[in-house]
Each structure stands twice: as structure tokens, then as C-alpha cells.
Image (cartoon, grey):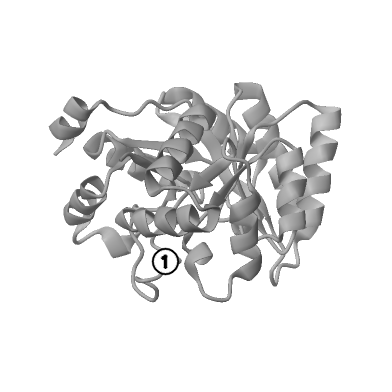
Amino acid sequence: MQLIDTHVHINFDVFESDLEAVRDRWRDVGVVRLVHSCVEPSEFSGIQNLADRFPELSFAVGLHPLDAHKWTPEMADQIRDLASSDTRVVAIGEMGLDFYKAENQQQQKEVFTAQLAIAHELNLPVIIHCRDAAADLRDWVQQFEKEVGSIQGVMHCWGGTPEETQWFLDLGFYISFSGIVTFKNATAIKESAALVPRDRLLIETDCPFLAPVPKRGKRNEPANLYHIADCIAKLRQIPLETLAQETTQNACRLFNLTVPSREQTGQLS
């Protein structure tokens, strides 16, 4: 069984002391590819160094909406140049809108649009963060596509209702579920995970955040993707192996990844 974790932050300090052991555990459960997201461009060189250490790691570059106040016109050029300079870059992000306690909604929208333009120019998918902003984000993407052109991407760590989920499916986006789907009271998210078409479903840990049951409350890590996959397979009433195959194929399609052969997987150990 092969799994792809489509959203990790293993550059965070909480992994510094035991990252090799964390790597061993993700390989043991069958995680063969990871997509490392980027909160701000200053992280880029550190993420590159991690990809040098772990060949299964691809990555994105972008500015998180909660850091939109850091945006400058020069940052657009920086993101474009970074994305163009390393073939391991598979997306722009994470970007998006986060209106939870936010007062700079218009600024976030402008920064989001600027990054959508870079992704469109470079023909790369986007990794979208959306919190308390689903309707605005849908409308903003629709406006961008009308004025500029189409965009592909994923709604990462998705926490929306089934209705909101359908909005983004209609826009052609993939939907990625994190450990939240395993939480007891996450009824709407479980319903969303059951309705996403099999060719648009992705899975992620968003580690070190949001560890799934039975690891809830602890530091999250890529090996916990197994528990997320198992939960979603049960919600969709399909074998875990089928869920793994479908989500791996989807991740490869969206991010232009390949999975290693069994012989290559063994060589990684």
C-alpha cells in the first residue's frame, strides 16, 4: 500500500530532534511521497534542504493568508523565481483566505489574487487555506477565472459543509482531508469526505497540527496519515487499499508526481 501526504510542515522546530525517526515511521506505514507546504518564502531554503535529505519530498512556495501583512510587490517576483528555480516545486501555496479573527480581509484577497496569477502563469496548482471564508473564496476564484483564466488546486485541510464542498468541486478543485475527519463531532466534515468523487479526493496530515484519533493531542507526523486514510475508507465503505490507490493517483495527477517502485522504496530505507 502506497500513501501520499499532500500537506506537511516538517521544517518546524518540533521535528528537529528526531526527524530521522519520523522519516522511518512514515516509510514503515507506506507513505512514499510528501508535499511540503510553505508558510512564507523565507522557509524555502530550509525546505529545499529537507528535500535534499528525503528524496520523496516535493514542495510548494507561497505566503499564508495570516501573513498577508508581510506582502510586498517584490515578493511576487521572489515566489515566481523560487518556483521556477527548482524542479521539485509542484505548487504555489499555501495561500488563501482566513477570516477567523482577521481584520485585513481585502489585503488577504489582493495577496491571494497575486499568487493565483503566479500559479496561472507557471501552470502550477495551488494549495488553498480557507477558514471562515468559503463564500468569499469561491467568489474570488470565480472572478479570477473569468478575468484571467482557469486554476487547478486543492482545498487543503478541508473543514467545510457538504454544500461548501460542492462549490469547490464545481470549480474543479480537489478536496483534501486531515485528522479533523477522525474527530467524533466532525459530522459535516465526515459527510463531505463521503461525498467527494473518488477522482478528487486527497489526504494529508498538516503535521505537526491536528493529529488524528487515536493520536489526538500529540504532535502530528506523516505516519499518522494511515489513521486518516483508514477513517475515510470506512466512511466511504471501501477497502483501505482502494482508498490508498485512489488518493495516491489523484495526488500524482494534481502535483505531477510519480511513485517509486517497490525496489526503489526499499532503496530509500
Would residue 199 be found to the left or right of residue 140 on screen?
left
Q: Tell me where residue 237 appears, x and y as whole percent.
A: 51, 53
Q: 116 or 181: which is nearer to us?
A: 181
Q: Tell me where residue 149 appears, x and y as whole percent.
A: 77, 25
Q: Is residue 133 above or below residue 90?
A: below
Q: Amino acid at mark 1?
A: Pro
Q: Tell me where residue 80 appears, x and y as whole percent.
A: 56, 29
The residue at 42%/47% (across/down) is 239
Location of the C terminus (image quadrant): top left
Location of the N terminus (image quadrant): top left
Q: 211 or 227: which is nearer to us?
A: 227
The residue at 80%/31% (across/down) is 145
- Local crowd size for mark 1, using a 10 Å CA cut-off: few (<14), some (14–19), many (≥20): many
Evaluate whether residue 205 shows in this view.
Answer: no
Would residue 40 be found to the left or right of residue 224 on screen?
right
The residue at 66%/23% (across/down) is 121
Q: 175 or 219: which is nearer to us?
A: 175
Q: Tell me where residue 196 appears, x and y as whole percent.
A: 63, 46
Q: Picture quarter containing residue 86?
A: top left
Evaluate whether residue 76 shows in this view.
Answer: yes
Q: How many marks?
A: 1
Q: Picture quarter containing residue 114?
A: top right
Q: Is residue 185 above or below residue 176?
A: below
Residue linked to disc 1 = 212
- SS label for mark 1: loop
The residue at 42%/53% (across/down) is 229
Would residue 166 be found to the left or right of residue 80 on screen?
right
